[in-house]
Amino acid sequence: MHHNRMFDLLRSHSAKAGDPPGQAAYVGPVKDFIPYMECVTYSGEAMERRRIEPSELHDVLDSCRATGTVLWIRLVGIHDPALARQAGEAIGLHPLLIEDALNTAHRPSLDEGETILFATSKALSYDEENDRILSEHVVIALADGICLTLEENPKNPWDAIYPRLQTPKSRMRQMGADYLFSCLYDTLVDNCFLVVDAIAASSRQMEETLIRQGEDGDAPLLKDIYSLRKQLLLFQSVVLPMYETTARLVRDEQQHFSEEVRPFLRDIRDHAVHVRDATMLLSTLLENLTDTAISLAGLKLNAVMRVLTVIATIFIPLTFIAGVYGMNFQNMPELHAHYGYYIVLCIMLIVAIAMLLFFRKRRWI
């Protein structure tokens, strides 16, 4: 069944109406999988990835703080508010931030505290089979050498990061949790390029179809264009706040990021600017395609109306002649002529041909 994510997000804003601020309650689609925790610990010498039980969380945190290793905790499945609250409180998240983390309709944003950097965002992908954008709510929190990610679905958006973590001499293994935060957010921004490419490909295909059809543009193609424009609106609602977030990361980079990481933040911002500009360009292109499709449909209708108008115009004098000779007067000229019927038909034919030649000369047909 086709799932319209845009209107689900709009409806979900009313789900917590009347609840007190800071109450940890999941807002989003129903999920049918069991949430789980995964931790990744690494340093220049070693890297380990494993699932952990919630009861192990504090022991893992204490161990990593004692040894100085970088810790990345993944909570996959935020539809269990108690588990999400436990993970958030373990690194010191404020209840209001945990509330934002559990609201899948929350727009991408950035909250900065003295020791915690908290970013809500979306992991985007494109479902080519159904021609729609898939959006997953994702939270990334940075606190004292620890990265915590809260993810809505079991589909892992960080697959490209693990090979880098497994390489002992990689930059990621040599740097701290602030660099891991930048890599995680950079992955979300880079995923937007895949969506841009998919929408651009669909736009090019529709444009080629319009050119090929010429004046035969039809309603089904216009319907497809409107559907793609709706998907682009959903995409824009994520991309623009993500750009604002990257701009804030660069502007306020001194507090949470080392000197070595700051150039990578600026690179993420540049990627976000590229995505934003591409989105605006695609929006303009789809508006032009809509106008073109409507114009072609109008041209088709005009061509049909022109033919019908010519036919009706030719028959006006012919109808007049037939009407005159259809009157029942006794003393009409040529009424009793032996060849009168044929003479009138010839006159009508000459009038029709003369009008066609006149229309052709004036280039009306």
Image (spheres, rainbow, N blue to C red):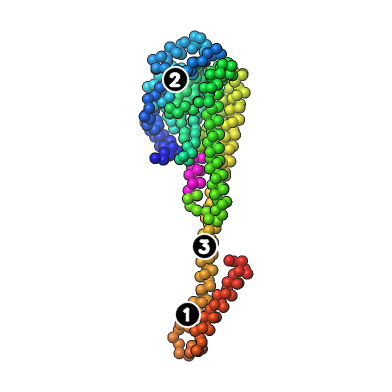
- Quarter of the rendering containing residue 11: top left
Measured Cα–Cα span from mark 1 to mark 3 = 28 Å
Which image quarter holds the N terminus? top left
- Ranked by sequence position, the earlier of labels 1 and 2 is 2
Which amino acid type is marked by label 3? Answer: Val
Would you say residue 106 sits in the magenta stretch? no
Which amino acid type is marked by label 2? Answer: Glu
Label disc, if present, on residue 38 of the rendered structure: 2
Q: Residue at x 61, y 30 (%)?
A: 270
For numbered disc 3, what is the local secondary structure? helix
Q: Is residue 175 left or right of residue 32?
A: right
Q: Disc 1 vs disc 2: which is toward the camera? A: 2
Q: 327 above or below 111?
A: below
Q: Residues within 10 Å of mark 2 (few under 14, many from 20)?
A: some
Q: How many numbered dots are placed on residues in this image?
A: 3
Magenta-highlighted residues:
222-232
The residue to which callout 3 is attached is 304
The residue to which callout 1 is attached is 323
Would you say residue 225 sits in the magenta stretch? yes
Q: Disc 1, disc 3: CB below 8 Å?
A: no
Q: Residues within 10 Å of mark 3 (few under 14, many from 20)?
A: few
Which image quarter holds the C terminus? bottom right
Q: Disc 1, disc 2: CB below 8 Å?
A: no
For numbered disc 1, what is the local secondary structure? helix
Is residue 100 among what the camera can see?
no
| Residue 329 x, y percent position in the rendering | 45, 87
| Residue 208 x, y percent position in the rendering | 56, 48
Which amino acid type is marked by label 1? Answer: Gly
- Quarter of the rendering containing residue 84: top left
Q: Disc 2, disc 3: CB below 8 Å?
A: no
- Ranked by sequence position, the earlier of labels 2 and 3 is 2
Is most of the magenta stretch helix, strand or loop?
A: helix
